[in-house]
Structure formats: C-alpha cells, structure tokens
Amino acid sequence: MSLFPTERKCSVCKKAFLGWEEWRYRRDDKWFCSWGCLRKHDKKARANRANARRLDRMERSEVVELLRKGTSPQRIADQVGVSVQAIMYYKQKAGA
Ligand SMILES: [Zn+2]
C-alpha cells in the first residue's frame, strides 16, 4: 500500500489525476476524478442493470417470435434495450 498519490485515469472522462489509497471516488478497481464522474458511472451501471431485468421479464419466446417474424436482431435489441449479442444468444438457443 502506497501512501503516495499515483497517477490514475478517470473511468468516465479519461482525465488523468492523482489518487491514493483513501481516494473516495472509487468503485472496485475503477477510479474517478470527481464526485460528478462517480455519479455518472453509478447512473450508467443502474441503467445497465435495469436493461438486464427488462430482458428477463420479456419472455424468451417473445424474442424468438419476433425473430421468426423476420424482425432484425438490431431492431429487437433497440426495442428491448439490450445488446445485439444478447438477442443473438437467444436466437442461437432457440435455433431460430
Ligand atoms: Zn472524470
């Protein structure tokens, strides 16, 4: 453990700053230059979790049905608010 400040890179704005062990604006291994950037990170993490929950709620069969109807994975992804990769995963699983 170093008591000396180390140059860190903000995970949000990419700005370099000096941080040390007791730095308050941290989340696990991510460092933030300011309270504002930490809040931005938290807000985004919350949105990502909400998106994952939304896909959980949306029945897999519903996604598969849209795929069978010929709706593009990109369009379903936009509609559901998740990545195209997640839709492709469902597509592959269903053999659609
Ligand atoms: Zn920042």
Image (cartoon, rainbow, N blue to C red):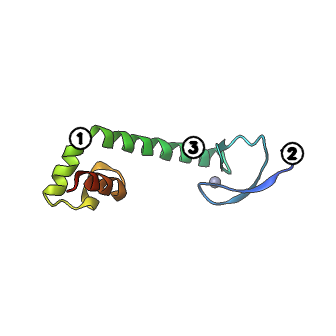
Which is more N-terminal, label 2 or label 1?
Answer: 2
In the picture of the structure, the residue carrying the numbered disc 1 is: 59
Image quarter for ligand 1: bottom right
Q: Which quarter of the image is occupied by the N terminus?
A: top right
Q: Secondary structure at mark 2?
A: loop
Which is more N-terminal, label 2 or label 3?
Answer: 2
Label 2 within 8 A of ligand 1 by Cβ: no
Q: Nearer the viewer, mark 3 or mark 1?
A: 1
12 lies above or below 25: below
Badge 3 amino acid: Arg
Crowding near pointer 1: few (<14 within 10 Å), some, many (20+)?
few
Name the one closer to the observer, 49 or 44.
49
Residue drawn at the location 49% of the way across and 44% of the way down: 45
Residue drawn at the location 86% of the way across and 49% of the way down: 4
**Extreme residue in the left direction:** 69
**Is 5 displayed left or right of 92 in the figure?**
right
Report if the CB atoms under discs 1 and 2 are less than 8 Å apart. no
Q: Secondary structure at mark 3?
A: helix
For residue 3, the mark is 2
Residue 14, position as x, y percentages in the image: 63, 60
Badge 1 amino acid: Glu
Q: Which quarter of the image is occupied by the C terminus?
A: bottom left
Q: Secondary structure at mark 1?
A: loop
Residue 38, position as x, y percentages in the image: 60, 45
Question: How far, Cα to Cα, is label 3 from label 2?
Answer: 26 Å
